[in-house]
């Protein structure tokens, strides 16, 4: 062709468009953290239980789970939850529809007659599921388990090694020692997309968690797996212990 694109260039453009489209419309998760004013956490939970979760569903947002940290001071003022969206574009449209919904506006106004619930703007992190993450399913498996939210921040270029280590053995050894695995995610946006892993574990009890981690740390198989990779983390993991709310899909 003298004018326009060659056939090969046209194929390349089509391939790029297909890849970008698949990324744009892939499922995304949203980790949200709310910090309340003093004495407002129970009221916030009541609003989620009675209204918010249903309105999320109405506007196409799937609830993964809702948790309250177990250690003070966050146990008295923090709600953590994860939503699943069909895409970033779908998330934007869903939030716009939710916030403009007359039912939500009425609930928000009436519930806060005696003062605002939140002490600051919610913290929101959009995430992609890691390619080794287990398939998400909303299940209730038992009473009063312990959830463990872990955030790993890597040295420059080390995230790929951390992911490889999880795939090579970490996940299998977790399962071997009774550590339940809810999900693994990477933030969507730079710079965290290039150096951060966020994952959520589930334990039957606090005592079971302690015993599982002790067994995991002393397992010769774990020592062997760990020895094959560089030390990836630039700082200590950020760990939050949580319990599910009574309205959470995952218990």
Image (cartoon, rainbow, N blue to C red):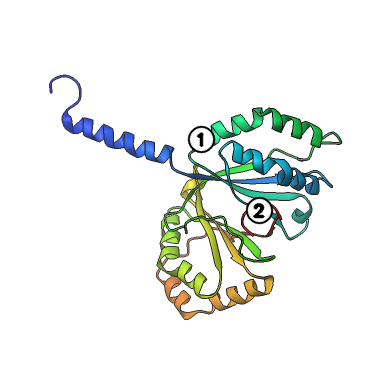
Q: Going 70% across and 45% down the picture, which residue do you hit?
A: 34
Q: Considering only vertical position in the picture, is 130 above or below 141?
A: above
Residue 244 seen in the current view: yes
List the residue tagged with mark 1.
90
For label 1, the SS is helix
- Tell me which label, 1 or 2, sits earlier in the chain: 1
| Number of numbered callouts drawn | 2
- Quadrant location of residue 93? top right
Q: Considering only vertical position in the picture, is 85 above or below 103?
A: below
- Give the crowd class for mark 2: few <14, some 14-19, many >=20 residues within 10 Å: many
Please tell me which residue lies in front, 95 or 221: 95
Quadrant location of the N terminus in the rendered image: top left
User: Could you tell me residue 125's position as x and y percent?
Assistant: 57, 44
Q: Is residue 144 left or right of residue 223?
A: right
Residue 196 seen in the current view: no
Dot label at residue 248: 2
């Amino acid at each position: 062709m003298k004018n326009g694109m060659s056939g090969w260039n046209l194929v390349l453009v089509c391939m790029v468009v297909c890849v970008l489209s698949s990324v744009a419309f892939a499922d995304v998760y949203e980790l949200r953290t709310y910090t309340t004013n003093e004495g407002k956490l129970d009221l916030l939970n009541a609003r989620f239980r009675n209204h918010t979760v249903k309105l999320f569903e109405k506007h196409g947002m799937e609830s993964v789970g809702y948790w309250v940290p177990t250690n003070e001071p966050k146990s008295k003022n923090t709600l953590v939850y994860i939503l699943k969206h069909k895409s970033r574009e779908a998330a934007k449209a869903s939030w716009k529809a939710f916030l403009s919904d007359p039912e939500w506006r009425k609930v928000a106004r009436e519930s806060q007659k005696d003062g605002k619930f939140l002490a600051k703007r919610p913290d929101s992190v959009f995430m992609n599921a890691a390619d080794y993450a287990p398939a998400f399913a909303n299940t209730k498996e038992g009473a009063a388990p312990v959830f463990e939210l872990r955030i790993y921040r890597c040295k420059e270029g080390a995230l790929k090694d951390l992911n490889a280590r999880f795939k090579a053995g970490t996940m299998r050894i977790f399962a071997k020692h009774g550590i339940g695995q809810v999900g693994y995610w990477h933030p969507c946006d730079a710079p965290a997309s290039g150096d951060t892993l966020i994952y959520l574990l589930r334990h039957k009890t606090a005592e079971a968690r302690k015993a599982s981690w002790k067994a995991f740390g002393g397992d010769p198989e774990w020592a062997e797996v760990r020895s094959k990779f560089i030390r990836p983390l630039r700082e200590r993991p950020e760990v939050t212990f949580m319990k599910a709310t009574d309205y959470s899909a995952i218990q």
